[in-house]
Amino acid sequence: MKVKDIMTKDPITVSPEAEITHVAKLLLENHINGVPVTDETGDLVGIICQSDLITQQKELPIPSFFTLLDGFIPLTSMKALEREVQRVVATKVADIMTPSPVTVTPDTTIETVAALMVERSFHTLPVVDEGKLVGIVGKEDMLRTLMPGMEQEEPKDIPSS
């Protein structure tokens, strides 16, 4: 089975300039983990997931220093601290999205997708064909392969007592 058999075509996307609160609302209302970020030409420039939004809520790490000849030497990279500060105070998608995300093609096997999801802790993977976003595949799409026919099944009424 291939990605094209299970992917969601025409996924919801957001722009890098979208407000983070708008993205949080989209994720919650649509019960999805992440959305691709596309520029004005429709090219994939990143992805933003629930974990990116949750990361924004964590406390900033206090940098560690040691002294040497009355000078302070940081034990952590100042660039890393600056990036964390940027993520915590971010208001736009561009500030916290994952740029240049790992992608798959419509012909990628679901075994490869499963390996990426497990080994690299990905929940959502954009699907690109010839450089253009054509879909998205998530963990729920993968789970549906275990339960064929679930989407056609009608909900059953549960009798009340």
Image (tube, rainbow, N blue to C red):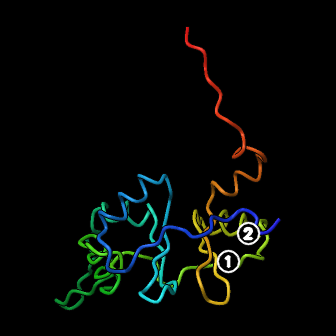
Task: Identify the residue position indicated by label 1 in the image.
Answer: 104
Front residue of 117 and 82: 117
Residue at the far left: name it. Answer: 70
Percent position (x, y) of residue 61? Answer: 29, 69
Which amino acid, mark 1? Val
**Quadrant of the rendered image containing residue 113:** bottom right
Q: Please determine whether, in this image, residue 49 is positioned above or below residue 28.
A: below
Task: Identify the element where label 1 is drawn.
Answer: loop
- Measuring 40% from the left and 59% from the top, which residue is drawn there? 26
Query: Which residue is under mark 2?
Result: 3
What residue appears at the point 32 percent right and 64 percent down from the top-left corner?
Answer: 22
Left/right of residue 127 with respect to residue 29 in the rendered view: right
Locate the N terminus by quadrant: bottom right
Pick the front one: 159 or 56: 159
Q: Residue furthest top?
A: 161
Say whether marks 1 and 2 touch (CB < 8 Å): yes
Estimate how packed mark 1 is, as few (under 14), some (14 to 19) or many (20 or more) residues with alpha carbons within 10 Å.
Answer: many
Determine the CA span between mark 1 and mark 2: 8 Å
56 with respect to 122 (left or right): left
Give the mark, 1 or 2, whose residue is nearer the N terminus.
2
Residue lying at 70% horizontally and 57% vertically, measured from the top left: 142
Kind of element beneath mark 2:
helix
Q: Quadrant for the C terminus, please.
A: top right
Q: Residue farthest to the right? A: 1
Q: Residue at x 63, y 57 (%)?
A: 139
Within 10 Å of disc 2 (Cα), the crowding (few <14, some 14-19, many 20+) is many
Residue 135 higher or lower than 155, as above or below? below
The kind of residue on which mark 2 rests is Val
Whole-percent x, y for residue 118 in the image: 67, 62
Q: Position of residue 153 (x, y in %)?
A: 71, 39
